[in-house]
Amino acid sequence: MNARTGERMLRPGIIAYNGYDSGLGNRVRVVLGAQSLAELEGRAFAYVWPTGRLFGPSFSQLWDFRAPVVSRAVSRALAKVFPYVDEKLDWLDDAKRREWLWQIRTGSPLQLPPEASPWQERFRGLRPAAPIAERVERLFDERLRGRHYVGVMIRAHQVSHAKTLQASPVEWFLGRMQEIRSADPEVTFYLSCDRPDVQAHVMQTIPGCVAQSDKGPYNSVEGVMSSIVDLYLLAASGYLIGPHFSSFVRLAEHLAADRLTFETAVDGLSGPIDHRAPGLATDPLRPALRHPERSLR
């Protein structure tokens, strides 16, 4: 905890704790949910966001987000006096409100009271860091502007959750994309994949794919920044196809204000899709805003 953090936490506060191995989706929803609770309760706010080999970038390298950061070591030391609580908030009563510090440690969304602002709303209000925003706009303008396209996210990296790898094999994505393309030969896919070799195979197999190249090592600073570019371009699509049990692709849903149909291998959907119904996103950094016409072309 630096001096600035210490000064802010002189008044009652909340610390949102993220583990070193926590993924981006879990981190974002815990931090923003705890920040919302802090504002509702009139408390100072700080958060734990470990960086290193397992996860490279800070929150502020990804979005314009300003709040005090606390180290894991400091949070764990404080936990001897102010033990961790979870996302259920059933611990929140008058006695708890008299405590100086609440430390929330969870990988799940906080069960916020109705009067708190939803973390998804806060997330849509964030502005990506300038290097990320520039890449999003450039790729969108060069390859996707004016197109109704389908967003496809494939998780194939060995560190992905076992449930995701088992329920969402690459072969299923290939089959579903081929089915959609058979019904609409002109369809464009925006492809996000966490393995370059799998991405190359999909692009060779399925015509009409747009994707980033040279995204950087997995979970490095450059790699996660590239994934945020993917996130916004997925959110600006008209239909999402993604892995089961992944919180990352849910972020794309929330950026689009939960207006997109999101399909996974476990949904049992088949046949043609309507990826034009949501309308066209004209600003990829605000994918929830759609042109009312089904097409601008």
Image (cartoon, rainbow, N blue to C red):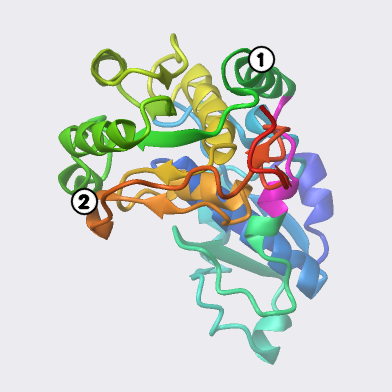
Secondary element under disc 2, as helix, strand or loop, is: helix
Q: Position of residue 186 (x, y in %)?
A: 42, 25
* Amino acid at the residue labelled 1: Arg
Q: Is there any visible trace of residue 53 in the rendered image?
A: no
Which residue is pictured at 51% across the width and 70% down the height?
A: 87
Residues rendered magenta in the picture:
122-129
Which residue is pictured at 44% across the width and 58% down the height?
A: 107
Q: Residues within 10 Å of mark 2 (few under 14, many from 20)?
A: few
Question: Circle 1 sits on which residue?
Answer: 138
Q: Position of residue 47 (x, y in %)?
A: 63, 50
Which residue is pictured at 45% across the width and 35% down the height?
A: 151
Question: Circle 2 sits on which residue?
Answer: 163
Compared across the picture, whether 102 is left or right of 183 comes to right
- Dot placed on the residue nearer the N-terminal end, 2 or 1: 1
Whether residue 128 is in magenta: the answer is yes
Secondary element under disc 1, as helix, strand or loop, is: helix
* The N terminus, quarter of image: top right
Q: Position of residue 283 (x, y in %)?
A: 73, 32
Compared across the picture, whether 133 is left or right of 10 comes to left
Towards the viewer: 254 or 151: 151
Towards the viewer: 96 or 117: 117
